Amino acid sequence: MAGGGGAFERYHCDPRADVLGLVPGGAGEILDLGCGGGALGQGLKARGARVTGVEKNPRAAAAARSRLDRVVEADLEGAELPFEEAEFDCILYCDILEHLRDPAALLASTRRFLRPGGRIVVSVPNVRFYPVIKELLFRGRWEYADAGVLDRTHLRFFTLRSIEDMLAGAGYRIERLERKNCAAPKMRILNRLLCGMLDDLCTDRYLVVARRAGEEGAP
């Protein structure tokens, strides 16, 4: 992923305005797992937050160090992360879980870093996106690409149900769910005529805000 300049910018330097709007405004200490070049964290720092990032890619980690308060260069599945229990108000998992062998294990193991009442923000591609289904059903094809839902670096694939089950299994309760609708205009019109019955098929990516289960009364 650290190849050509265009690929690097796409993977590591996206400011992710869609995610920025989901991070609680009162979150002062934020952990960005798979922070890339730190563009999202830079936006959060502009709001007054202190941002720590973890990034495996050396080139991206170097870029992030110029933007974030602290960067740990580490493999999320192969390193013991050097953080304290209850250190962060918010933990971000933005388009990183699909690149892991065991994303549920990461969600569970990093749960201890979240403060009581804290939130996690998750961004995950949806494998039920209709172009993927169409190619599979009508052409018998499952072809990887340089980007998108079938990015060739993805190890795991998710539907809304599997995302919900994974978060519940890791001890979280979803409190907000947003869909990124990248469907073609004709598909959007059809979905409206069907009163949203095709929402999941029109969704390229799910954005989730969750908190630890059992903290329903927390602010």
Image (cartoon, rainbow, N blue to C red):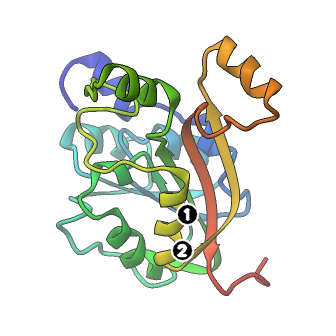
Q: 65 or 13: nearer the eye?
A: 13
Judge whether 91 appears above or below 126 on screen: below
Residues tagged 1 and 2 counted as in contact (Cβ below 8 A): yes
Is the residue marked by circle 2 packed among few (<14), some (14-19), or many (20+) residues within 10 Å?
some
Horizontally, residue 191 falls left or right of residue 164, namely: right
Left or right: 188 as drawn, with respect to 160: right
Name the amino acid, label 1.
Glu
Residue in view at x 66 percent, y 19 percent? 187
Q: Considering only vertical position in the picture, is 96 above or below 59?
A: below
Name the residue rendered at 58%, 80% in the picture: 115
Please tell me whether mark 2 sits on a helix, a strand or a loop.
Answer: helix
Seen from the viewer's position, the closer of residues 46 and 55 is 55
Q: In 3D space, how far apart are the residues under numbered discs 1 and 2 (Cα atoms)?
A: 6 Å
Q: Which residue is mark 1?
A: 164
Q: Residue at x 26, y 25 (%)?
A: 143
Helix or strand or loop: what does disc 1 sit on? helix
Name the residue carrying label 2: 168
Residue 28 point in image, percent of width and height: 63, 64
Residue 195: image location, x then y, percent: 82, 34
At 46% from the left and 67% from the top, the residue drawn is 166
- Image quadrant of residue 97? bottom left
Q: Is residue 35 above or below residue 81?
A: above
Residue type at mark 2 is Ala
Q: Which mark is residue 177?
A: none
Residue 145, x across and y down, in percent: 28, 24
Crowding at dot 1, Cα within 10 Å, few <14 / some 14-19 / many 20+, comes out as: some
